[in-house]
Amino acid sequence: MLTTEERQRHPLLKKLHLDGPLLLGLLTLCVASLFIVYSASGQNMDMVIRQAIRIGAALATLFVVAQLPPRFYERISPLIYGLGVLLLIAVLLVGEVGKGAQRWLDLGPVTIQPSEIMKLAMPLMIAWFINQRALPPRFLRILAALTLVLLPTLLIAKQPDLGTSLLVASAGLFVIFFAGLSWRLIVFAVMLVLAFLPVLWIYLMHDYQRQRVLTFLNPELDPLGSGYHIIQSKIAIGSGGIDGKGWLQGTQSQLEFLPERHTDFIFSVISEEFGLIGVTLLLALYTFIIIRGLIIALRTQDMFGKLLAASLTLTFFVYVFVNIGMVSGLLPVVGVPLPLISYGGTSMVTLMAGFGIIMSAATHHRLIIRDGYQ
Amino acid sequence: MRTRTPIRDHDAESSLFAGRVIFAIVVIIGLFTVILGNLYHLQVDEYNDLQTRSNDNRIKLVPIAPNRGLIYDRNGTLLAENLPVYSLEVIPEEVSDLNQQVAEIAQLLNIEPDAIEDFERNVKTQRRFNHVTVLDEMNEQQIARFAAKQHKFPGFSIEARLVRHYPFNDLLTHVVGYVAKINRRDVQRLDELGRLPNYAASRTIGKLGIEKYYEEQLHGEVGYRSVEVNNRGRVVRTLNTEPPQPGSDIVLELDIELQRKATEILGENRGSIILMDAKTGGILAMASTPSYNPNWFVSGISVDRYRSLLNSRHSPLLNRATQGGYPPASTIKPQLGLLGLQSGEITPTTRIWDPGWFEIKGVDRRYRDWLAWGHGWVNVSKAITESCDTFYYDLALKLGVDKISDFMHQFGFGEKTGIDIAEEIPAIMPNSGWKRARYGEPWYAGETLSVGIGQSYWTATPMQLVAATGVMANYGEFVVPRLLKGYGTLSELDAVEPEYKPPVAVDKPSYWQVVHDAMVSVTSDVHGTAHSAFRKAPYSSAGKTGTAQVVNLGEDEEYVAEEVAEKYRDNAMYVGYAPAESPEVVIAVAIENVVGGGGSIAAPAARRLLDTWHKRYHPEQYEEVESAND
């Protein structure tokens, strides 16, 4: 953690509204991503270059986002949220269909994925809304906030995109949690969700989503069909052992037994080629970034910034947890990439924009230094 | 908007928030610990299992067929070889426009539309990265044409494999046999024997003759190439190769020149000639006619051709040497004479009067001798030399069929000789019990008389005759006929030892001498039935003729060979050994349905083969003649 003295050694970073440790962590991940994508893509240099360009664009986004003060974001929150909801409705009406789901909106020269916008719009909106009154929020406000969370979540789930709706919902719920939602309500909500699960299973889930859950519960049920992904992934992870097969030496990935190896299942490639040592280091790096994000949240003076930073950081954690959980067989397979490592553009930019907001919160306010939190 | 909420306790809110953050950190660390614990479980606890499954994914074993052992004759002549056969193969995955390319190739190489249809069907059933045969057994012209334009057809290649070939065609079919495609029954049998994995890459298996009997030695041990494959099964690289162990070469006792001669002697006739080494049992020649080309079977015989072989009235598929059950006729008179002496029913000097027929007391039927006016006074020696039937009618009646049958079993009649091919029948050595079991009838005395001259139900294969005659030549020692000389090649031969059956024992060695002398008289005495056939032979020999009736004639019927249908004509038989004083080879001849008999047809046939043998194996006795010719 940086002390005042240390921060003064980095006047340049301060002036650029960047947080040194957080940036270091993110850059390390990005560099690792290039090496891993090179291996996972079957040593396809074109894909590495494309990934590098995306990283560049994402970092540029981070930089731009970080320059604007949290107050700006606070002001535009309802606007972005409203726009996001409208676009989500538009997707359901006229969206592009891909892989059996409508996720993209064709706007002439560019196609956009409104659910990505919602990943940021959701915590912004809820933080803004909760912060209208003193904390902890009252029951009615919580109910209103939950409605605001539920609306886009359902719209995204309807596309259907279970992974993103989960992330978007988390982002909103985390804000409410950090705002001081009473524990009684939390316990009540958890029980309500458990009671809701059968309804979800019977009425709201699509066949392929139910299949994923069934396959998750017993992948060997269909080893060549829907269970194939998870079985091959576990083989890849387990056969990596403690020290791994070595970079470019993973047979599961190089010989293409592992599906989606450069996107959702890239963690399995890391496990196979770098072993338990490699994944422990990766988890340590993620932990470092998450803890740093939470420290920034603690130090931020402004409650809107606090809530936002904490929620965005925790959403990042959910990314990591859900992705690793699903490829290692702990969670059902929902389409969530390994953040900042997986090959792919949209989530990379959204994630970096999120970190831009965290850095904005970290650098545009006087930081409170209190003994208890150092 | 903030201004509307003036009473906010920022410190309280911050500490509430801080509490939540600390809670979140605890949960995060807890969940990451769960993740890490699960990874530890997979990568450490289940490492061995998952490592194995990873290797199972990527490593495939590709079997490599061993080269089949070659078969030589005793002088090193190759009897069964492996020739390269070329086929045009394609990996569909590597060809962009398969149909177009195949159409061009079909035109270039003149491939039948039927073959192209077969190919297209195969393409659909195979995985796309596997070899599929476009054209099998390419001729030289096709190979040359394709080779010249190969650059135009990427993904297509000419592949070579070894295919069994029998250079002597139909000359050795009943000896060497053949290999043919492995069928479902073979698979089942190999599976039961636990030898199926050894055939993982083999296309053919021995089906007949030596090829079948020595399959295990000839086949060799399969090899393996372990290759790394990707998820579509395409071979990425070879990891390791365990080369196959080629099958053992084998050398037969057979002499291809004698085999050729024996077959030539049989000519258009149906029949069999066997020449056996008297000491080792080694088969020098084993002809059975008619025969057929074994090469037809190697890559699959056409249904029409097979049906014509199967339905031919000449039964070419029958191996007459070991599966032909012929009435032995008078060829067994030496053994029967020996039994007479051994049993005490006769002595060397016991004689009877032969008026040309024999009568059983109380039965009003005359059993005729082949010599209508009779042989006069006959003892056992004369009975063998002149092949007197009446003497043997009398002797057989005295001995009874069961005694005869028991003794003849000692000479191998009614039992497989144990020669090293699977196609062998035990034929029939009847006795009274056999007849009751078979026909539910008692044995009649008249049938005993027929047995006395080697007829009735009695049948024997030429192989049994040669073995039984070998026992005579060796004075009781019973050497088992055998085709195999040894494993390896002539220069490094791992020879097999001769096998013996229990010897035939008699009380006085002089009994052997009596019968032996009589057999010598057959060829040397002016009254001997084979005297004219062996006149002026440059070696001495012993023998016995036989003429077997195929149909039973009535008491007064006259048999005139030229007048009866061919298939009812007599069989001509001959057995013998040479040289008489120190037997080196034993011979048996059976020729079906001829005009003539043992003396006029079979004995001259035996003479011709023995002459050839003698010239080849005792050339020193011909040197003077040859130098004179030079």
Image (tube, rainbow, N blue to C red):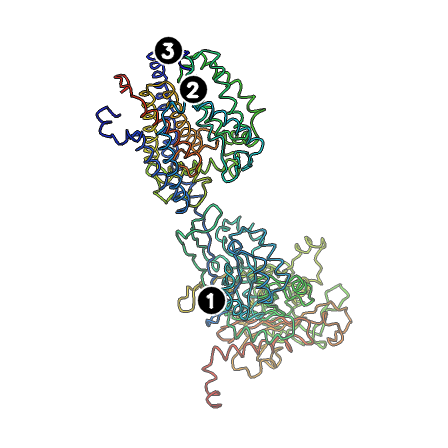
- Which chain is home to disc 1? B
- Residue B235 in the image: x percent, y percent? 45, 51
Task: Tell me if mark 3 has few (under 14), some (14-19) or many (20+) residues whose alpha carbon lies within 10 angstroms of its own.
Answer: few
**Are dots 3 and 1 in contact, CB under 8 Å?**
no
Give me the disc on residue B251.
1
Amino acid type of the residue that numbered disc 2 sits on in the rendered structure: Trp
- Which secondary structure lies at badge 3? loop
Question: Within the image, what quadrant is residue B292 found in?
Answer: bottom right
Give me the disc on residue B8.
3
Which residue is tagged 2?
A: A128
Q: Nearer the viewer, residue B434 or B399?
A: B434
**Are dots 1 and 2 in contact, CB under 8 Å?**
no
Q: Nearer the viewer, residue B332 or A327?
A: A327
Left or right placement of residue B364 versus residue A287 in this view: right
Depicted B282 relative to depicted A253: above or below: below
- Which chain is home to disc 2? A
**Are dots 2 and 3 in contact, CB under 8 Å?**
no
- Residue B67 in the image: x percent, y percent? 46, 61
- Which chain is home to disc 3? B
Q: Residue at x 47, y 66 (%)?
A: B251
- Which secondary structure lies at badge 2? helix
Q: Nearer the viewer, residue B56 or B314?
A: B56
Left or right placement of residue B534 versus residue A191 in this view: right
**Residue B478 visible, this angle:** no
- Residue B376 in the image: x percent, y percent? 67, 76
Q: Nearer the viewer, residue A347 or A245?
A: A347
Depicted A320 relative to depicted B478: above or below: above
Amino acid type of the residue that numbered disc 1 sits on in the rendered structure: Val
**In whole angstroms, how far apart are the C-alphas of marks 1 and 2?**
98 Å
- Which secondary structure lies at badge 1? strand
- Residue B599 in the image: x percent, y percent? 63, 77
Depicted A276 relative to depicted B71: above or below: above
